Amino acid sequence: MLKDITLGQYFPGDTVAHRLDPRTKILLVTFYIIALFCAKGAVSYGLLALTLAVCVRISRVGLHALVRGLKPVLFIILFTGILNLFFTPGERYLVEWGVLRISDTGLRNAIFMVIRIMLLIMGTFLMTYTTSPISLTDGLERLLNGLKKIHVPVHELAMMMSIALRFIPTLIEETDKIMSAQKARGADFESGGLVQKARALIPVLVPLFISAFRRADELATAMECRCYHGGEGRTKLHVLHYAARDWAALALGAAILVGVLALRPLGL
Amino acid sequence: MAEIIRTENLTYAYPADEGAAPALALRGVDLTIEKGSFVVVLGHNGSGKSTLAKTFNGVLLPSEGHVLVEGMDTRDETQLLAIRQRVGMVFQNPDNQIVANVVEEDVAFAPENLGVPSQEIRQRVDSALRLVDMADFVRHAPHLLSGGQKQRIAIAGVIAMEPTCIVLDEATAMLDPMGRQEVLSAVHRLNREEGITVVLITHHMNEAEDADRVVVMDDGEVVMDGTPREVFTQVARLRSMGLTVPDTVDLLDRLRKDGVDVPLTALTVEECADAILEAIAK
Amino acid sequence: MTRGGETLEPILQIQHLTHTYSAGTPFQRSAVEDMSFDVYDGEFLGIIGHTGSGKSTLIQHLNGLLRPTSGRVLLHGKDIWAEPKKIRSVRFQVGLVFQYPEYQLFEETVYKDIAFGPTNQGKTGEELDRCVREAARLVGIRDDQLDRSPFELSGGQKRRVALAGVMAMEPQVLVLDEPTAGLDPAGRENLMANIRDYHRNKRRTIILVSHSMDEIAQNVDRILVLKSAHVLMSGTPAEVFARADELLTAGLDVPQVTRIAMRMREKGLPINPAVYTVQALERELLALRKGGAAC
């Protein structure tokens, strides 16, 4: 189960998608999300799906990796889809079973909503798959740099995020280890109802939290020993530069966004 | 030889529960670490050896007395960065000192903090990784490496600060024999070829065999201080402190008690075997 | 196998065990490959090998935490996976203590933590109390420590509590993965003494996995040497260390004493190749000297 978590996973590569500046990729994903929420009709959705398909192709990430990323959120997608399907009032009802009624708008909304969420998640995952977490946080830090003026702790937030990403695999491994150790003492994580299953997790969660706090404490000391003193005066191994390809990518992204916005009043 | 670290009447008390007397982890330690030397600090758990190490770069501040690093007092907060840049520290658990999820980013962490220009960071990272023999792993994810490799990354991360001294606080305790060997040969090479002072805190006796100097701690005090030969020949005393001696010395000690004329100073397997052969041939 | 005239019965039989990780992907890799060996009732077996030799994967098969890709594990002659639903009962019969087991402690008191395993087993009342107290005694935890929080104890004591937590299930086989890792020499020796006492008094099978040749040499009846997912050799310590050169070529360590003896033999001293403890080598040398003096 834990192995399915793909958040923050990075597939190293050397394609254009990998080489783009992280800031470009963050902006492009932002454009993409705005476009998704502004899309009205089949033409727009088609355009956006096509855009994603081309990007996936360029990145050579492989569609199955993206689809696997959808698995943990499948429930949410289905849930939203069903809500839209049954509870959207419309002019014409296609099916009626007592309170459950499917309207034509409902069907339409449900289909678009499911496609929208799927594209949104796959688009975001494509970014995390092609960008190392560290350059992602780097990019985010640089993009939000202006907010420092209004006392938003941008550097600290970015540092927290990159450390969290660094420790995800370590903590997953640790969880597996603790679960095995408790299973060896006869712990049963499979049987019983929801309450019993939740109770069975206590022997895993308590050691996991204790260990996480110990790690945090030791890591903080190690960071201080390596002269960490906040973001002030800090330099970077990799300095971010916009290249020609970044401008080109941003221009294309903006064009697609403008296109979707233009299609909106037409209901396409 | 110039000194790099000097402790004067160094005393450290861990904060105790209210009303109870504070537990003294260090009781007036006077110690000088010479530049370029390889010093091993031995002691059982709770002897104060790890506490001592943590005072060397101001992770812990003395309750009484002073720790001076190249003349700078660790209690002087304005000097703290300068002290930490000179005395690098490697800890026990390799997983809890790696900050980034790409090897080169992790090694770059300290120079980034010090505000070193990007180009120079690149050079420092590459040369540090070469020195610990990890140059092939620049773009790897640290969590997929072995324990010995992770510890060498941690050492590289410290080397990238260009310190004059590295303190390894039980950095080999969690490693398997192979990992331990990798780390030891890396620090010996740094000491020999780069002239970096090494302070190795450990409870593995055999890691002290090649040291210039062995310091033995017991109950917060330095109880022995000398060359490995001088220290290891005091078999009974080491045993009384819960430490073992290498099997070579144990064997020689037993044979001497049996009336065989062998020296106690043959530390390595080869020396020991040869010394016994000579004595038996007589 | 026989020891002291009595024939020992195999308690665990490992037959052509193979375990493949990530099968069908480019990362496919066999951590254990076609391993076969028996573990006898009441013996003290040592398993030695590098990190990555398959030790950890192997021992997780002995109590059914991992399921073989192929091959079988028999407990008392019965395949442990014959009835997958009953795999938990195997875990009570083959107790497994992981590396750094102190990180598995979670209860409010030492007593409750030790009682976790036996409670899962269904033990209650006086029987439970007896198991907990006996296990605590076996590892040297005092009665007054039972009501304390395990997190207040020292590192070495926490490890003992974790060990007691598995011993309290009264398993017929106790598997210990690097029980002394990270402890100082005195701590190592104390813990090994507890384990030896347990073996002597309970006469139950122990499987000790260790990196330390010296620790293995001083404690076990029989050694299994693993290398790259296979069994490289097995035999009594004397038999295994007599093949010290093979161990060294395989990149494994041998006890320091064995290396001293090897060096002396190279130089022409007729020393028994099977010595591996300081005392034994001392005796050999003294005998040689007396023999030499008589000439």
Image: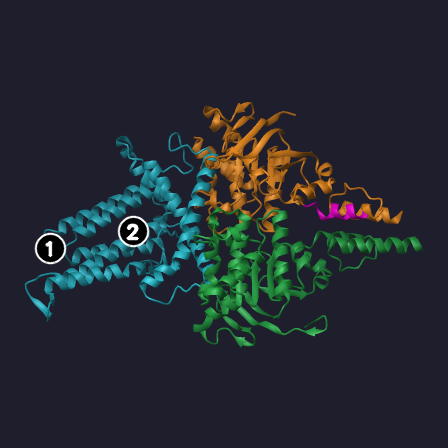
Chain colours: A cyan, B orange, C green
Q: Which mark is residue A267?
A: 1
Q: Position of residue A67 (x, y in %)?
A: 32, 60
Q: Which numbered mark, 2 or 1, is in the foreground of this view? A: 2
Q: Position of residue A246 (x, y in %)?
A: 31, 42
Q: Which residue is mark 2?
A: A124
Q: Nearer the viewer, residue C168 or A76?
A: C168
Indicate left or right for A222 with C244 as reference: left
**SS class, disc 2:** helix
Q: Chain of mark 2?
A: A
Q: Nearer the viewer, residue C219 or A71?
A: C219
**In magenta segment, residue B221:** no
Q: Please, which residue is most extreme toward the left here?
A: A91
Q: Is residue B229 above or below residue C60?
A: above
CA gap, disc 2 and disc 1? 26 Å
Amino acid type at circle 2 is Thr
**SS class, disc 1:** loop
Which image quarter: residue B172?
Answer: top right
Q: Please, which residue is most extreme toward the top here?
A: B71
Q: Label 1 near label 2: C-beta < 8 Å?
A: no
Indicate left or right for B138 with A4 as reference: right
